Image (cartoon, grey):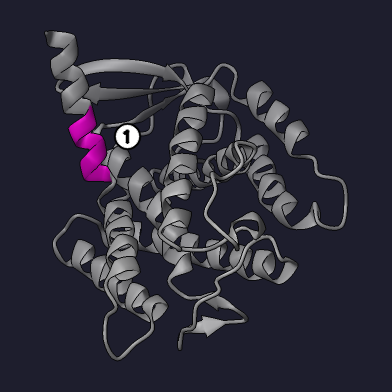
Amino acid sequence: MRALKQLMYFGWEQALSCLFPVVIFASLALTQFVQLPLLYRYDWLLLICLFMQWWMVRSGLETRDELKVITLFHIIGLALELFKVHMGSWSYPEEGFFKIFGVPLYSGFMYASVASYLCQAWRRLNVNLVKWPPFLAVVPLASAIYLNFFTHHFWVDVRWWLSALVIIVFWKSSVTYEVNGSLYRMPLVFSFILIGFFIWIAENIATFFGAWQYPNQTEAWSLVHLGKVSSWLLLVIVSFLIVATLKQVKRNQPFDSKTYDKPTITGEISE
C-alpha cells in the first residue's frame, strides 16, 4: 500500500509539472473539433499558449528566471522547426496569420513546454544531480547533439555515435528526487530514455490532433515511427543539459566532477 501511495503521489506531482503540455494537448483537441471564429486554428493556438505562459508567471507557478529558460527553448525549437519544415521533414498544412516560412509561431511553445515540465518537476520533486560530468564535457556534447539535427541532412547522421557518448559521459551520473518525504535515486541515462519515450507518445497524440504532419501522414494519420524515439531522446538530453547547466551557473558551483559525489544542485531557478 505504501508503494502504491508513493506511486500515486509521484504521478500527481508529474501531472502538475505537465500542466503546460496538457493545456497544449487540450487546445489541439479542442481546435481540431471546434472551429473558433475570426482567426485560423494555428493563430488561436498561439494566443492560448501566450495566455497560458502569462498566467503561469502571474500565478507564481513559474518564476521570471524560469521564463527566461523557457523563452530560450522557444527560440531553439523555432529555429529547428524553420529548418526541418524547409527540408520537408514535416509540415504545417493549415493556414495562419502568424506563420513564418510555413511554420506557425505556436510550434515553439511545444519545445518550451518540455522546458516548463523540466523546471516544474525539478522544483516539485527536489531533484538533485549526483556525479555530474565536467562543464567541458556537457556543453560540447549538447551542442553536437543539437547541430546534428541540422547537419545530418548534408552529412552523415551521427546520432548513434552521440547516443553512445551520452552513455559513456553520464554512465556514473544519476538523479535523486523526493516523493512524499522519501528519497529515491535513478540512473540519469534511464531517466533520459523514460522522458524521451513519453514525449514520443505525446508526439503521436499531437500529430493525431493535427499539430503537424509527417510525410507518411498526409493521406491519413499513422503511428509515428518508433525510430523517432531516438530523436526525442537526444532532444530531451539537450533540454536537460541546458536546464541543469543554467541551474549550476545560477548557484555559482565549480565545474568539477569531484564535487558531485553527493547531490549539490537543488531547487528552482530563483529570481
Seen in the picture, residue 33 relative to 263 is either above or below; the reply is: below
Name the outermost residue toward the right: 155
Residue 236 in picture, x, y percent from top left: 52, 42
Q: How many marks?
A: 1
Please state the horizontal and vertical placement of residue 40, each as a whole percent of the image.
Answer: 38, 83
* SS state under label 1: loop
Residue type beneath disc 1: Thr
Q: Residues within 10 Å of mark 1 (few under 14, many from 20)?
A: some
Image quarter for residue 28? bottom left
Given the current orientation, which residue lies at the most extreme top position? Answer: 1
Q: Compared to 31, does 256 lie above or below?
A: above
Label 1 sits on residue: 266
Q: Between residues 77 and 258, which one lies in front from this camera angle?
A: 77
| 247 is within the stretch colored magenta | no
Residue 187 lies, in percent from the top left, at: 47, 18
Q: In this view of the protein, can residue 69 be seen by the observer?
A: no
The answer to which quarter of the image holds residue 186 is top left
> Is residue 239 toward the left or the right of residue 170 in the image?
left
- Identified at 64% across, 23% down, the residue is 167
In the depicted structure, whether residue 1 falls above or below residue 68: above
| Magenta span contains residue 15 | yes
Residue 54 or residue 216, whichever sits in front? 216
**Res. 68 visible in picture:** yes
Farthest front residue in view = 219
Quadrant placement of the N terminus: top left
